[in-house]
Image (tube, helix red, strand yellow):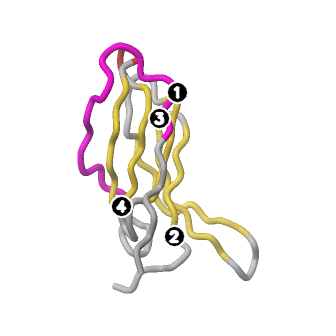
Amino acid sequence: MQRIANTRLLSFALLVASVVLMATTATAQQVALLEHEMFKGTANSLVRVDVETYALAHRGQNNDGFITTFTISADGGTITEVQSLEHDSLQGTHNSLVQPLERS
């Protein structure tokens, strides 16, 4: 399956959603939705790691900090949570991820 170039992942509250950006109409269409966090899901910072992988730092249960990775299918129809790591067991606020530089 060929990747749709304008497919992106968005994060808000307890959810992540894939959207397709439509250049011809300047709109975005939601394709899939995944609830990734059951407790808090705040202080989100989302970056695209590569063409199909995203990393999300967020505050979860007990205000702890987590980094969760997701993959998104070429057409945006499937979002898969790959792995979640607790990186701060005291206070997971003020998360800020930086997207790695692309190499040519």
Q: Residue 101's quadrant in the figure?
A: bottom left
On the image, the x and y values in percent for residue 99 come to 47, 55
Along the line of sight, the residue nearer the viewer: 61 or 89? 89
Identify residue for label 3: 14
Q: Is residue 39 above or below residue 1?
A: above
On the image, the x and y values in percent for residue 9 come to 49, 57
**In the rendered structure, which amino acid carries the disc numbered 4?**
Thr
Identify residue for label 2: 7
Contact between marks 4 and 3 (CB within 8 A): the answer is no
Q: Nearer the viewer, mark 3 or mark 1?
A: 1
Q: Residue at x 24, y 45 (%)?
A: 83
Q: Residue at x 35, y 61 (%)?
A: 53
Whichever of labels 3 and 2 marks the residue nearer the N terminus, that label is: 2
Local packing at callout 3 (Cα closer than 10 Å; few below 14, some 14-19, many 20+) is some
Whichever of labels 4 and 1 marks the residue nearer the N terminus, that label is: 4
Residue range in magenta is: 78-96
> Disc 3 and disc 2: Cα gap in Å?
20 Å
Reply yes or no: does residue 90 show up in magenta.
yes
Contact between marks 4 and 1 (CB within 8 A): the answer is no
